[in-house]
Image: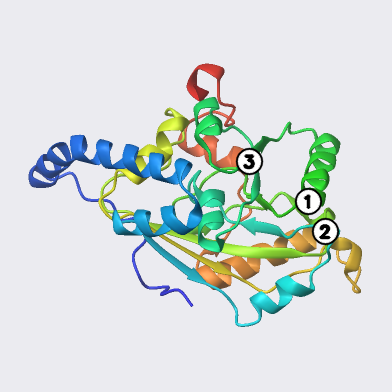
Amino acid sequence: MLDHHKPRNNTFRPTPLAMLVMFVWFPLGSIIAIIRIIVAISLPYSISTPLLVYSGIKLRVIKPDHHLESDSKQSKTKGSLYVCNHRTLLDPLILSFGLSKPLAAVTYSLSRLSEILSPIRTVRLTRNRENDRDMMDELLNQGDLVVCPEGTTCREPYLLRLSPLFTELTDNIVPVGMDTSVSMFHGTTASGLKFLDPIFFLMNPTPSYTFQILDQICGVSSNDDKSSRFDVANKVQSELGKALGFECTMLTRKDKYMILAGNEGVVSAAKKQ
């Protein structure tokens, strides 16, 4: 289990000495981030993962003992649906590297540059429920899929309300608890340029990612107790909260953006570039 008392995402206080260190580190950090990106997108997992760890990235993977066994028994007609809480835009990529297998990911407002550079397949959601359901169902028929139903990143120890659409797609729902730790730069923004988020995260000297794969949860079609899609989504949120030590909330993506940026989280085309 994760250490629930360990500080998360604690960047430095802006003291004169800390700011001096940041400005001295910034050029080197930019170069290191670019190198890390090149390694991630150009080399196979067996080579890139050790190199990224050697560069200072800390990656910790926690799996249940029966995870490999359950993988071998899963339906051959559909892939696994990995449901993650959303810490940074790198969540699906980190999961793919940690499992050492290619995954597809659905996104809401990923920049064109991030899509081009992503070493895994990314598909944009349209926010039209029926269209998105059909698209995600098709992706699951082709292999494993990652979805972050919070709809936006949250860097504090809280979980936003999960959109329940994923509960209708499959009975092989695998919750994944994501946690990050940084020392200098946050890899998230509510009103800035989204394509810079992964770069700033990778500019940290030793950015840390921990993810925990939890026990499988059935979707609405296999619930003997006739749970609704909202009940299943709330159960997934609850299990993620317990594993991470995060507080579950009923706040939505729109609530987050209204509080932090004074808008509903609609990213303009200019800010996506």
Look at 86% across and 62% down and name the residue there: 220
Label 1 – label 2 distance at C-alpha: 8 Å
Is 73 situated above or below 101?
A: below
Label 3 – label 1 distance at C-alpha: 13 Å
Between 32 and 206, the residue placed more toward the observer is 32
Look at 85% across and 41% down and name the residue there: 134
- Residue at image mark 2: 170
All told, the count of numbered labels is 3
Q: Is residue 186 visible?
A: no
Q: Most extreme residue toward the bottom, as rendered? A: 65
Characterize the local packing of mark 2: few (<14), some (14-19) or many (20 or more) Cα atoms within 10 angstroms.
some
| Contact flag, marks 3 and 1 (Cβ < 8 Å) | no
- Residue at image mark 3: 121
- Residue at image mark 1: 140
Characterize the local packing of mark 1: few (<14), some (14-19) or many (20 or more) Cα atoms within 10 angstroms.
many
* Label 3 residue SS: strand
In this rendering, position of residue 173 left or right of residue 213: right
Look at 30% across and 44% down and name the residue there: 185
Q: Position of residue 256 (x, y in %)?
A: 54, 41
For marks 1 and 2, give the one nearer the viewer: 1
Q: Amino acid at mark 3?
A: Arg
